Image: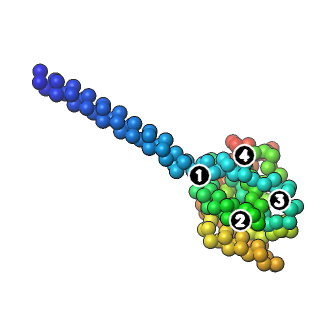
Amino acid sequence: MQTDSRGSILKSNLKTILILIISIVVILLLLFRNFFFKSTYLLKSFGELSADPEIAFTNNKPTFMEFYAEWCEVCKEMAPQVSAFKDEYEKDINFVFLNVDNQKWGNYIEKFDVNGIPQVNIFDKKGNLISTFIGKQDEMKIRESINNLKKEENQYEEIINAEFSTIHENKNNEFSPRSHG
């Protein structure tokens, strides 16, 4: 008899401890959701914060253009860095963010031969392509390219990192969420 009551007390205590642990985890996730989901939130906000590409290429300012997707893990990793660039340079540089899953950007995806994301293209104030970065990049490399925009003459530079998400074109040359790798 006594062992049965000990067993039921033990089961009751285990249930209480389990409920307590689950409650703590849920509370921590709610309290720190901005920390845990910051990159995803930043990527979603990029589209809203973006300058229109047509205006960006005609307002006599350099342009930072990023091709990204919300599902892209490398894009999520780079989002805080890109957001910091925007905060630091947005007075002097246009920031254009184009989600590759949005069909209206298909002509830009094709024009700039985007086949891996994130892809960052940096243009001088005349709209000349100065640098292309594909995949995860070192902050200093991008910063150096941005700072080189002050020079009168820049030579084109392409930097590709093995860490990127591949984009696959479908047969009709249309872009949809399902046509990307």
Tag 1: amino acid: Ser
- Disc 1 and disc 2: Cα gap in Å? 20 Å
Tag 2: amino acid: Tyr
Q: Which mark is residue 101?
A: 4
Tag 4: amino acid: Asp
The N terminus lies in quadrant: top left
- Disc 2 and disc 3: Cα gap in Å? 14 Å
Secondary structure of the residue carrying tag 4 is loop
Res 10 → quadrant: top left
Which residue is tagged 1? 39
Q: Which mark is residue 56?
A: 3
Q: Nearer the viewer, mark 3 or mark 4?
A: 3
Q: Nearer the viewer, mark 2 or mark 4?
A: 2
Q: Nearer the viewer, mark 4 or mark 1?
A: 1
Secondary structure of the residue carrying tag 2 is helix
Q: Earlier in the sequence, mark 4 or mark 1?
A: 1
x 35%, y 33%: residue: 19
Residue 36 is at least partly visible in this image: yes
Within-10-Å neighbours for mark 2: few <14, some 14–19, many 20+: some
Give the residue furthest to the top: 1
Q: Position of residue 85 (x, y in %)?
A: 66, 63
Within-10-Å neighbours for mark 3: few <14, some 14–19, many 20+: many
| 179 relative position to 3: left or right | right
Q: Earlier in the sequence, mark 1 or mark 3?
A: 1
Within-10-Å neighbours for mark 1: few <14, some 14–19, many 20+: many
- Disc 2 and disc 4: Cα gap in Å? 26 Å
Within-10-Å neighbours for mark 4: few <14, some 14–19, many 20+: some
x 77%, y 75%: residue: 150
Q: Earlier in the sequence, mark 2 or mark 4?
A: 2
Q: Which mark is residue 89?
A: 2
